[in-house]
């Protein structure tokens, strides 16, 4: 029991989870080099660059304590601050209890996000999860707007208002976005909502374990179905082997990116930020840069910065992510609700970036929202 009590006191969604997940990603990829013989093992340079990226990320996290003390003028101590304050848990409400004006507004945003996703699927004329040609068309502007509305709104709703009916909306949204065939969106919805609930509810360790099992199964199943729905691809690998292969292949792409630093000279970042008005897919540009073919390619969290700006760009990016995540992580301990929800959304998306890379406009929009909320919250805390 003492061991379980100690485990429950560990803040598993501290920003340092990024480090552990990257190491886990390396471990998952290893069988593809040693057992499956599908890929040639990468050289030592790959591990050196990953280590450098992690070092700058860790420095960013550690540097944040100094920033917090300087600008907020509070003596923050990691060891003395509970990462879950039960006094701040959302008040449990029944379905029939009166909805506040704030709750109604957030609820409308969630419902609008769900409605737009239904419209998006209907306009496609089929289920992208089972049809790769539809999957390529699923990420429309309607999809983007619906995702921007749904993901932060459902997290804010869960963080501030504890009603069982809100979980039904979460499940509906999760199912609809899973039908697009993209692994990242349902994983982000599930992971971000769990992070939000983790900080605003008293979730027992056994339920935490169940969650990680569920998300692992979801990741494997959606990925396996989506890949096998591609008509011209025939895989001899089973679902677990395919996960290892994809991780190994992505790291091999990173190895190529390390050897082709600065080749895109900012084009990837520009294509990402102009994604709403520009039809150029930054992952296709990455494929052109590393494979010389027009193919959507993931390059890990380190790859795009290396291809655009070299090792300096990668160092700045990882340091910034470390600082930003830690600032949100500290601030949400003082201001539960919207800050906790935004932290859940951004941490979940950053964890997904470990494989896909920061080439999604929607995630940078969430980062921008996070920056605005962070500035406003820190300013109010500093005055208090």
Image (spheres, helix red, strand yellow):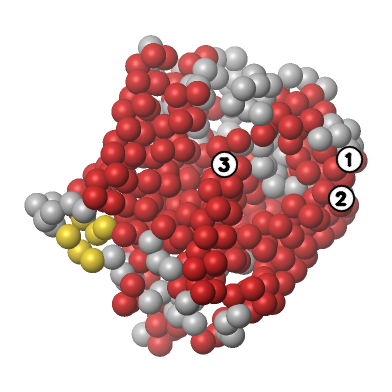
Vertical comparison of 184 with 289: above or below: below
Circle 1 is placed at which residue position? 261
Give the image location of residue 308, x and y in percent: 82, 38
Which residue is the site of mark 2? 311
How far apart are labels 1 and 2 at the CA level? 8 Å
Whole-angstrom CA distance, mark 3 to mark 2, is: 25 Å
Task: Tell me if label 3 and label 2 are in contact, CB under 8 Å.
Answer: no
Q: Nearer the viewer, mark 3 or mark 1?
A: 3
Q: Position of residue 26 (x, y in %)?
A: 69, 53
Q: Nearer the viewer, residue 88 or 184?
A: 88
Number of residues whose C-alpha sits closer than 10 Å to that of mark 2, classed few (under 14), some (14–19) or many (20 or more): many
- Can see residue 11? no
Query: In the image as oriented, which residue stretches furthest toward the left?
Result: 96
Are dots 1 and 2 in contact, CB under 8 Å?
A: yes
Residue at 79%, 55% (x, y): give it: 316
**First-in-chain label (3 vs 1):** 1
Is 367 displayed left or right of 322 in the figure?
A: left
Q: Secondary structure at mark 2?
A: helix
Question: What is the secondary structure assignment of the residue under circle 1?
Answer: loop
Residue that mark 3 sits on: 365
């Amino acid at each position: 029991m003492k061991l379980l009590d100690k485990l429950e006191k560990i803040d598993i969604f501290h920003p340092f989870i990024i480090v552990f997940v990257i190491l886990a990603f390396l471990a998952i990829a290893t069988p593809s080099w040693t057992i499956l013989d599908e890929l040639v093992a990468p050289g030592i340079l790959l591990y050196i660059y990953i280590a450098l990226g992690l070092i700058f990320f860790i420095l960013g996290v550690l540097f944040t304590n100094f920033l917090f003390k300087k600008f907020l003028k509070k003596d923050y101590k990691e060891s003395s601050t509970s990462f879950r304050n039960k006094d701040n848990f959302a008040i449990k409400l029944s379905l029939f209890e009166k909805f506040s004006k704030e709750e109604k507004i957030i609820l409308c945003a969630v419902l609008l996000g769900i409605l737009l996703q239904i419209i998006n699927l209907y306009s496609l004329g089929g289920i992208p999860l089972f049809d790769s040609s539809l999957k390529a068309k699923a990420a429309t502007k309607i999809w983007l707007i619906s995702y921007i509305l749904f993901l932060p709104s459902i997290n804010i709703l869960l963080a501030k208002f504890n009603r069982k009916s809100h979980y039904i909306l979460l499940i509906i949204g999760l199912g609809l976005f899973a039908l697009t065939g993209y692994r990242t969106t349902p994983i982000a919805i599930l992971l971000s909502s769990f992070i939000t609930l983790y900080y605003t509810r008293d979730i027992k360790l056994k339920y935490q374990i169940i969650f990680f099992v569920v998300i692992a199964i979801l990741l494997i199943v959606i990925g396996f179905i989506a890949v096998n729905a591609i008509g011209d691809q025939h895989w001899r690998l089973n679902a677990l082997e395919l996960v290892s292969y994809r991780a190994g292949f992505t790291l091999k792409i990173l190895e190529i990116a390390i050897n082709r630093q600065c080749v895109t000279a900012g084009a990837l970042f520009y294509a990402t930020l102009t994604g709403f008005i520009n039809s150029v897919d930054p992952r296709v540009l990455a494929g052109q840069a590393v494979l010389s073919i027009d193919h959507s390619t993931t390059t890990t969290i380190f790859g795009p910065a290396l291809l655009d700006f070299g090792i300096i760009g990668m160092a700045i990016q990882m340091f910034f992510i470390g600082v930003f995540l830690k600032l949100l992580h500290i601030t949400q301990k003082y201001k539960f609700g919207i800050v906790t929800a935004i932290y859940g959304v951004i941490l979940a998306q950053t964890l997904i970036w470990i494989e896909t890379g920061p080439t999604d406009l929607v995630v940078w929009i969430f980062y921008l929202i996070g920056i605005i909320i962070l500035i406003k919250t820190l300013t109010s805390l500093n005055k208090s």
